[in-house]
Image (spheres, coloured by chain):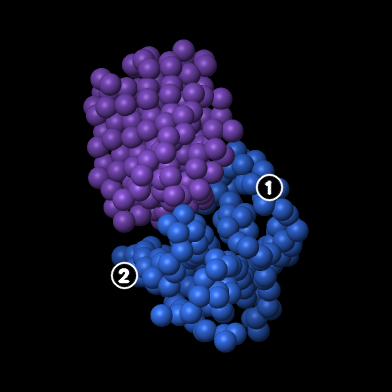
Amino acid sequence: MHDLSIPSSSTTPAITARVQEGFVEIAGESYPENSVEFYQPLVRWLQEFMTTQKRHLTLHLRIPYFNTSSSKCLLDMLDMLQSYHYISGGAVEVTWWYDEHDEDMLESGKDLSENLDLKFVLMPYTGS
Amino acid sequence: MTDKGIIMSFQGALAQSIIVEIGQTLRRKISAQHNESLSERTKLVKHVFAIFVELAQNIMLYSAEQEIDISGKHSGVGLLVVSETHDRYCISSANRILREQREHLCRRCESLQSLSKEELRRQYNERRRLPRSTDKGAGLGLIEIARRSDSPLSFACVPLPEHTHALFMLSAYIDKPRHSLSSPTI
């Protein structure tokens, strides 16, 4: 399987997914016209990773703003990874990065982590 | 000084590119109006922007009046207004809906009006787990708007002369930070 690299746009985050390292990063704002369509390549990549690689996966999320439709996509992907973690025995770790001056970004991370049973680290960064 | 007027208004077919343009301008304008701490400014700008995006994308995807461009792409038609008084911002939208959606939509808005922030958070998280009702949205928009607002939503459904449609109007309010009210405008 191949690595995935999608550059950011004004309404979509950059997506990087590397097979060998088991590394996925979503970075940037997310409010596309059609979130399901936008996240489809990553969902497919994750499905392939889970069935063929059977290894640990670290997910880095740094999403300052996302609309409600993207929010649903994120939760669906994390749910899928949670099943992978518990049923398929692949270890998954999530790091939610938040701007230390942005309490909403921290709250979004908390909302997600409280609705999941995964190793979920909330990590502050200093905004530019 | 009670009324400062309209910051931005748009009427017509809302395509994603227009939403991006207006949204960026709105963020810049509101950010420039405030000199509070970075945290307070971030929160204020983000809440106005989040409500704007949900209202605008809602019109784009679900307005009962759709415009089709030469490439065959649909864009919902509606009205968006961002206005301010001395102590708060108001983000409003208006668009046509089908008459039969009226009751459901009004009931939904009414039920959100009485919920606390914590109840809204819970409902958001519960609803996010439900399967999507359509492939475009997650039905979370109204809850998100209520969560980001500082006052209950105000809304109205007005029957239109043609019996098939109604006009749906929604306004959300965001308070300006308190100490910005007393400081003189430079």
Indicate the amino acid at tag 2: Ile
Q: Is residue A84 above or below residue B50?
A: above
Observer-nearest of B16 and B1: B1
Q: Is residue B182 above or below residue A81?
A: below
What residue is rendered at 43% in x and 45% in y? A100
Q: Secondary structure at mark 2?
A: loop
Q: Is residue B54 visible?
A: no
Spatial CA distance of label 2 from label 1 is 46 Å
Label 1 environment density (alpha carbons within 10 Å; few <14, some 14–19, many ≥20):
few
Left or right of B163: which side holds B144?
left
Q: Is residue B140 above or below residue B159?
A: above
Indicate the amino acid at tag 1: Glu
Name the residue tied to disc 1. B118
Please say if the residues under marks 2 and 1 sit with CB atoms less than 8 Å apart.
no
The mark closer to the camera, 2 or 1, is 1
Of callouts 2 and 1, the N-terminal one:
2
Colour chain B is painted in: blue
Q: Is residue B146 above or below residue B34?
A: above
